[in-house]
Amino acid sequence: MGKAVLGKITCPHCGSTEATVHEQASRSARLYYRCMDGPHGPCGTIQCTLPGGQKFIRDNMRPLNGVEIDEAAHEAAEVAREEQTKVAEKQSKRKSGLLDAIFGDDDE
């Protein structure tokens, strides 16, 4: 599952104001940003792990407004739903495969 959106930043590569700031899952918990709405296509995930890059992100990150918070929550819920559906389908296939092996038709 994707990390929560902490804020937004203007992408220095393409100028998009819609790049989202996230925190790594590792113990170092460094900040990174994702630019997916650039004018010439997405720039991708940019990880500036050295102190200068972290300072740039902290200094230029802006908090989410009310609408952006709602959008981020909706997107997180959709991602969680997709992940849960995948897990449920995988479990269902495992159970049906085992039950078919035990109680399957031997008409073949």
Image (cartoon, rainbow, N blue to C red):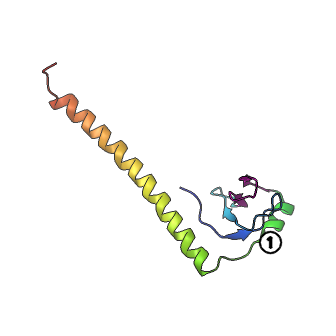
Q: Was residue 43 drawn as part of the magenta stretch in this picture? A: yes
Q: Position of residue 32 (x, y in %)?
A: 72, 60
Q: Quadrant of residue 96?
A: top left
What residue would you read off at disc 1? 60
Q: Residue drawn at (44%, 54%), measured in percent from left and top?
A: 82
Q: Residue drawn at (66%, 63%), measured in percent from left and top?
A: 22
Q: Residue drawn at (22%, 28%), measured in percent from left and top?
A: 101
The three-letter amino acid code for the residue at tag 1 is Asn
Instruction: State whether the magenta stretch is mostly helix, strand or loop.
Output: loop
Q: Residue furthest bottom?
A: 66
Q: Position of residue 17 (x, y in %)?
A: 74, 68
Specify whether 3 is left or right of 15. left
Task: Give the camera-side residue of 3 and 26.
Answer: 3
Q: Position of residue 77 (x, y in %)?
A: 47, 64
Task: Give the camera-side residue of 79 and 28.
Answer: 79
Q: Quadrant of the C terminus?
A: top left
Specify whether 2 is left or right of 51. left
83 versus 11 height, above or below: above
Q: Residue furthest top?
A: 108
Classify mark 1: helix, strand or loop: helix
Q: Quadrant of residue 20?
A: bottom right
Q: What span is in magenta? A: 30-49
